[in-house]
Image: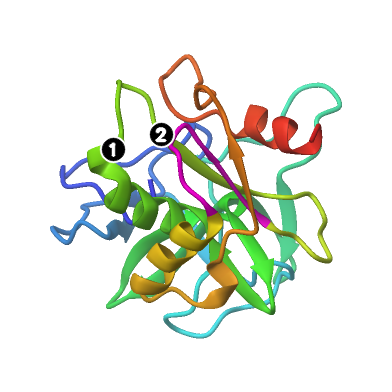
Amino acid sequence: DQGRGFHRPAVRGQHARHAAVFHQPRQDPLDEGLPAAAGQPRFSRQAHCQPVAPGENGRLLVRGPNVFSGYLGDAPSPFVDFSGKSWYDTGDLIFERDGVLVFAGRLKRFVKMGGEMISLPAIEQVLEAHYSAAEAGDGPALAVTATADEQHPELVLLTTLTTDRQEVNQVIRNAGLSPLHNIRLIRQVEEIPLLGTGKTDYTTITKLITQQ
């Protein structure tokens, strides 16, 4: 989840493909941890493999003897060329603070709008906090996604709650988010699609939006 860190003094593995990239996490809940000797992290701009300025969000790229060599079959390569070397693109957005790596979110959960990277989880967190008293049952009551139009994407709210754009966007403004975070479409659903793990199934949600 966005902004979530690790508090155990143990090596962190992600998807088991580049385990031991980080170790000795700090106590701050936003901290991801310190780079471990077995992994070499680098940060690049979201759309281009270029270095980012200190403190700026960038894609986390890693390489080292503990990183897997690729997928079997004809799956697209997850590796990118950066600084003359091959790096594994984790799909994570990270920034560095006082030598500590801080997780900002998954790249696929960000949408570029008006030259700004909009965090969909940030919008969800604001709305979930506001509507928490109205939520019922064990599953989530809402999810935020975006239309597939890369040039002019629109933010879409799927929800089991009764609400409208005016109310939702007022909540977003009251939380201090910019107008770029405003919801353009609301789709009422009986339930939010879930994965077998109980987490929100954003792949199915994207398909639902596409089929509208």
Give the position of the C terminus as an image quadrant: top right
Residue under the point 80% across and 65% down? 152
Residue under the point 57% across and 80% down? 52
Q: Position of residue 67 (x, y in %)?
A: 55, 41
* Residue located beneath label 1 in the image: 134
Tell whether 70 sits left or right of 58: right
- Up-down relation of residue 14 to residue 175 (above or below): above
Q: Are marks 1 and 2 in contact (CB under 8 Å)?
A: yes
Q: Amino acid at mark 2?
A: Ala
* Nearest the eye: 41 or 37: 41
* Nearest the eye: 142 or 50: 142
* Residue located beneath label 2 in the image: 141
Q: Position of residue 107 (x, y in %)?
A: 59, 55
* Nearest the eye: 122 or 208: 208
Q: Is residue 43 visible?
A: no
- Up-down relation of residue 183 to residue 23 (above or below): below
Name which quarter of the figure residue 19 lies in.
top left
Residue under the point 82% across and 22% down? 73
Give the position of the N terminus as an image quadrant: top left
Q: Check if residue 115 falls in the magenta segment.
A: no
Q: Local crowd at mark 1 within 10 Å, few (<14), some, or many (≥20)?
A: few
Q: Amino acid at mark 1?
A: Ala
The segment highlighted magenta reads 155-164
- Secondary structure of the residue carrying tag 1 is helix
Tell whether 174 sits left or right of 107: left
